[in-house]
Image: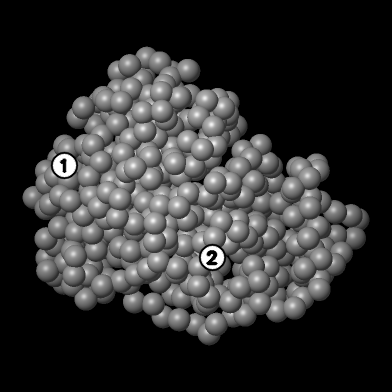
Amino acid sequence: MAVVGIDLGTQSVKVAAVGDDGRVLAAATRPYPVRSPHPGWAEADPAEWLTATVDAANEVVATSPEPAHAVGLSGQMHGVVLCTADGTHLRPAITWADGRSAEQAARISAELGAGELARLGSAAFPGFAGPTLAWLADHEPDMIGAARWALQPKDWLRLMLTGDAATDPSDASGTLLYDVVAGGWSEAALAAARVRPDLLPRVMPSSAIGGVARRAAGSLDGLPVVVGGADAACGIRGLGLTAGHGAIALGTGTQISSVLDSPRPDQTLRTHTFATTGDIGESWYRLGAVQSGGLALERALAWLGADTAEAQRALAQGVESADPLFFPFVAGERSPYLDPTLRAGWRGLSLGTSREAMLRSVLEGMAYAVSAAYDAVRDSGAAPAEPVTLLGGGSRDAAYVQLLATSLGAALRPAEVGDATVVGAAGLAGALIPPAGVRDAAIVNARDDAVVAERRARWLSAVEGRGAL
């Protein structure tokens, strides 16, 4: 018997049937857009999430050699879906990449102070549910008044499938409304964000049954659906990471995770401390979050009329001292700068700058952004054991992996684990499912590279000085 794993991502949903041995038996992906009706906004239509999920699930169930007996969920973190009791959404979902709530985040930060924010696991940053709900209270109070629930994306999806509302510790801990240390909604945070307590659902263990699929669920009808978990936490489960170990996941954003043995918040607030999947108060992880990874690459390639392969070829020629520096902050930055106003661009362009130099500088700037976040994780006392597992599309490009290892000063082990998150989600509904199979490449060690060291130092100095950024 198989378990259906669903990973509701930012720009697409992946659905897979996973066997008892952890093998993916069938899989399907469906895309959907993120829209920006105003500068700095990042919204999505939840109805498109549901349609895409059911369509992909129908394909997976039809092609899986084994029948499904349960459903596990994973989803993008931090976003907000305002909906009625039956799940009807009242407005577009506001996603993690949305920057409209900078003023509200600053207000929450001032009211709570660093000590209380540390207990919430994060600095107050736009795109988190707390500041987003505060913005909605300020600008769309009628929507807040009409809402029964304010849900995380995967929790809204489960409500639409089952009719039941709930969340789990891993998603709750990413809202800026949850006390990571005590394990429950924070009265102080709710007050600072002007959030009605009854808008938030009950918190249940990630593997608890959150309802039975029965509403517009297509081929999933009649299957039990577990509460599920946040995408980063499901990825940790899918990789089988334990305390002291971590991974770097290269995607739309980049996530540097390191599993903790206790809820030890980063008092500097330069990184995040979230709960893993599981029971309340069971385990935690440190997260360095780079806001603009693949997102910055996508935009830069569009500006230059290039593709990823061309950028990779340019990087393979080697970084040169005279190349411009690229700053990838198309959506501000989280770790370690906590600055939503940071913006992207090149510095050092001249009449002699080539197209190739601009392209490789994009990948170089992304690597330096990851290295800054990695330094913050390491400085917080949560450095993952080396070699660090490296996942995602960028992990398949040898030149980029070498640049990243040198920039981080850490040994990396690229691994082909395209299904870790969806396997982790399925594992929540099938306790015996082992971690995803990892096909390791050779370990890539940091090199002594004077050019990279000098350029990284200039890049860091420019960002920390905020000169012309």
Q: Nearer the viewer, residue 431 or 109?
A: 109
- At x 11%, y 65%, the residue is 67
Establish if 413 lies above or below 180. below
Residue corresponding to mark 1: 162
Q: Amino acid at mark 2?
A: Ala
Q: Which of the 4 image quarters holds residue 47?
A: top left
Q: Which of the 4 image quarters holds residue 177?
A: top left
Q: Which of the 4 image quarters holds residue 278?
A: bottom left
Point out the image quarter for the N terminus: bottom left
Q: Position of residue 432 (x, y in %)?
A: 18, 70
Q: Secondary structure at mark 1?
A: helix
Q: Position of residue 427 (x, y in %)?
A: 24, 63
Is the residue marked by circle 1 packed among few (<14), some (14-19), or many (20+) residues within 10 Å? Answer: many
- At x 33%, y 22%, the residue is 196
Q: Amino acid at mark 1?
A: Thr
- At x 31%, y 39%, the residue is 184
Is the residue marked by circle 2 packed among few (<14), some (14-19), or many (20+) residues within 10 Å? Answer: many
Residue corresponding to mark 2: 383
Establish if 451 lies above or below 338. below
Q: Is residue 16 left or right of residue 129?
A: left
Q: Position of residue 332 (x, y in %)?
A: 62, 42
Q: Is residue 312 left or right of residue 170?
A: right
